[in-house]
Image: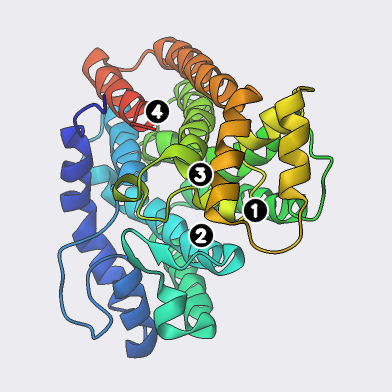
Amino acid sequence: MTPSVPPQLAAARDLVDPVLREAVARLDPITARVAAYHLGWADDQGRAVQAGGKALRPALAVLSARAAGASAEQGATAAAAVELVHGFSLLHDDIMDGDRTRRHRPAAWTVFGTAQAILAGDALLALAGELLAGHAEAACFLAVATRGLIAGQAQDLEFELRDDVALEECLAMAARKTGDLIACACSIGARWAGAPPAVSAELTAFGAELGLAFQLADDLLGIWGSPEMTGKPVRSDLRARKKSLPVVAALTGRTAAGDRLARLLARPGPLSEADLRLAARLVEEGGGRSWAEKEAQQRLVVAERHLAASGIPAEVGTEFLDIARFITTRDH
């Protein structure tokens, strides 16, 4: 059963949205139009709509400011910068993966063209730097996380060309591609507010483990999630032959199902719907699904330990855990 959406997500969206809109308004009209569409503010004609993402990373960043004794409002700028980096990564990621849908509608590159979507992603990254220009520590911290995200994406792309990806390699890739930015979100507000280094370090460690748990849950949704949940076609990750964590766990598990899965994914040409159903069953029979579910829970347990060690106010810790449990226990 999917838990209810934590109210912190909507609150963070309401708080950070004006900061994001003010930043995007500084872009040239062409790029701003692509950005507004991608961020869920407008349709392809520029008309205002009610859409947008979950505001997960902004909510974590705002909580991290509160963890250091600052107000939610004081964390809004850092939270917006993190969300701009996330937006940049999704714009480019959809192009690299050839994903044609994002949040239940056509991806920006399919509407405005690849070149314009790339430029919009570049612009969002530049805006993130602008927002943090007056705070060197936070700006450097976000830049390092962005570099890690890019390294993870590069490794993910390289995996598509290999049939010998080890599970530890895949975990390390996910830790950078997803974990680095979530780890940054979980502590950048605290750094912005001048928290002691030990507190920031524990919040970063909490976010790193949460990021892996989130990626594991997301990979499960990429195979078994409904289009209503994911905003993408069913079994989209298998259709793209992505080396996701459940798939690699099955491929490297030394089982008959894993061997059969390897042969199926190695076939040339597109996979049929029957092939995709079979592949999903083989991932499950090969132990990939159960391993990913257990690993996500173990990562969440370790994350909770880091949170407890941070010494932050109990009510803020509870809100962190509400979000952590929500994003790692969605139906799949």
Q: Secondary structure at mark 1?
A: helix
Distance from disc 1 to disc 4, alpha carbons, whole Å, reads 21 Å
Crowding around mark 3 (Cα neighbors within 10 Å: few <14, some 14 to 19, many 20+) is: many
Where is residue 22, by image quadrant? bottom left
- In this rendering, the answer to whether 180 lies above or below 285 is below
Crowding around mark 4 (Cα neighbors within 10 Å: few <14, some 14 to 19, many 20+) is: many
Checking the image for residue 176, the label placed there is none
Asked if labels 1 and 2 touch by Cβ distance under 8 angstroms, the answer is yes
Q: Secondary structure at mark 3?
A: helix
Q: Which numbered mark, 1 or 4, is in the foreground of this view?
A: 4
Q: Position of residue 135 (x, y in %)?
A: 44, 52
Of labels 2 and 1, earlier in sequence is: 2
Q: Position of residue 206 (x, y in %)?
A: 47, 24
Checking the image for residue 153, the label placed there is 1
Asked if labels 2 and 3 touch by Cβ distance under 8 angstroms, the answer is yes
- Most foreground residue, 329 or 304: 329
Where is residue 33, by image quadrant? bottom left
Counting every numbered tag in the picture gives 4
Crowding around mark 1 (Cα neighbors within 10 Å: few <14, some 14 to 19, many 20+) is: many
Instruction: Give the residue displayed 79% in from the left and 22% down from the top.
Output: 254
Asked if labels 3 and 4 touch by Cβ distance under 8 angstroms, the answer is no
> Which residue is label 3 attached to?
181
Of labels 1 and 3, earlier in sequence is: 1
> Which residue is label 2 attached to?
89
Instruction: Give the residue displayed 31% in from the left and 45% down from the top.
Output: 229
Q: Quadrant of the N terminus?
A: top left
262 left or right, relative to 109: right
Q: Quadrant of the C terminus?
A: top left
Instruction: Give the residue displayed 22% in from the left and 58% down from the top.
Output: 17
> Which residue is label 4 attached to?
328
